[in-house]
Amino acid sequence: MMIALKAATPQLPRTTAVADHVVAVDETDSTNALAVQMIGDGSLTLPDHQDGELAVAVVAADRQTAGRGRNGHKWVSQPGRCSTMSYAVRIPRAIATDESVNGWLQMIAGLVTLDALNGMIEEYGAAPNQPDCSLELKWPNDVFCHGLKLGGLLSELVIPPSSGTGTDADADDDVVIVFGVGLNLALGACRLPTPQSTSLQLHVSGLPSFGEMRDAVAERQVEGFRERLAKFIADPKGQAESLREEVKAVCWARGRQVEAHFTDGTTLTGEAIGLNEDASLILRTQDGTDHTVRTADVGVL
């Protein structure tokens, strides 16, 4: 019989040292929902970014009772085994709402997460069990290892109380993007929520305790969001081109036959060729036609 795990408030000394604000609770319905609520009621504020330095706030919980993924999917997490964090960052409204570049915000979140995981593994001298245990991104929002889901990301735009809405909105206003990141760090095989999921400890040996892992990864994510988003804000078009090349190297779907499932129930099958300039996926069907996929669940065939 599987023993129920008890939630405890996350201890995040390294993350607290680098973040502008950290909220840690033992349990909540969703760290994204809590972050959005606190931003809306003014209890979580982020200072103006100055000299290119972005403020980053963190909302963490040991257990989520109603974790969410894209397109209404549920995210199942277990206390003491899964990291559930949300990172809130102020960025210009003009960039957050520009469809020609805002798709890269989700890709940046994925790259920040890979950097943080790989950096933590290197810091502690851990090593993959097999040479091909590399971490990859499954477009647009999953962390994959060996073709299995190790983590998921969900980004949401929030209008802070100080910003206008509707006709009062100013293109120069800042908005807040909340990036939710759920990672299976220390789940045993018997606790995996689905056959398509996995956990970092199943692929890497020599890892530290779960608490140390969670804090070390979150610390790096704060610094990664701050650095990468500052560069993106300074030059969205230029960064989009370099990000496109960077994502290409870690894109799990590229070169595979995949099936895109759209919210209206339709599907499209073809080879994932790469990404467009706006971060949408290029899917080439059997007749040689290239299709642009902007919002869909993508699975390998």
Image (spheres, helix red, strand yellow):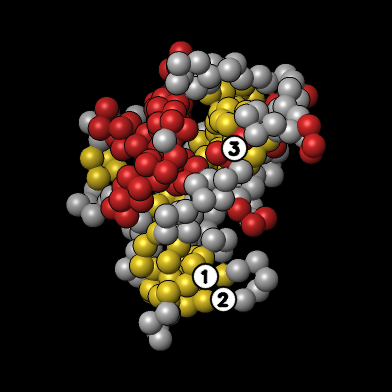
Residue 221, image quadrant = top left
Q: Is residue 158 visible?
A: yes
- Residue 45, percent across and down? 66, 19
Name the residue tied to disc 2. Answer: 267
| Tag 1 and tag 3, C-beta contact below 8 Å | no
Q: Amino acid at mark 1?
A: Ala
Which residue lies at the image location 46% right of the left edge and 19% below the top edge? 53
Disc nearest the viewer among 1 and 3: 3
Mark found first going from the N terminus, 1 or 2: 1
Q: Which residue is mark 1?
A: 260
What whole-number distance in Å separates the C-alpha atoms at marks 1 and 2?
Answer: 5 Å
In the rendering, at what x and y percent does residue 181 appear? Answer: 52, 40
Q: Work out how far the residue at label 3 is from the one at label 2, CA to CA, in angstroms.
A: 32 Å
Label annotation for residue 238: none
In the orientation shown, which residue stands out farthest toward the bottom?
Answer: 287
**Which residue is found at the position 19% from the left and 52% from the top?**
131
Q: CA distance from mark 1 to mark 3?
A: 30 Å
Q: Residue at x 52, y 70 (%)?
A: 260
Residue contact at pointers 1 and 2, CB within 8 angstroms: yes
Give residue 201's position: percent from left, percent from top: 36, 43
- Mark 3, Cα crowd under 10 Å, few <14 / some 14-19 / many 20+, is some
Quarter location, residue 38: top right
Q: What residue lies at 40% left-to-right and 52% top-to-bottom?
A: 137
- Residue type highlighted by circle 3: Ala
Of the pair 125 and 246, the residue shown nearer to us: 246
Which SS class for mark 3? helix
Q: Tag on residue 94?
A: 3
Nearer the camera: disc 3 or disc 2: 3
Q: Specify which label sits upstream in the sequence, 1 or 3.
A: 3
Q: Amino acid at mark 2?
A: Thr
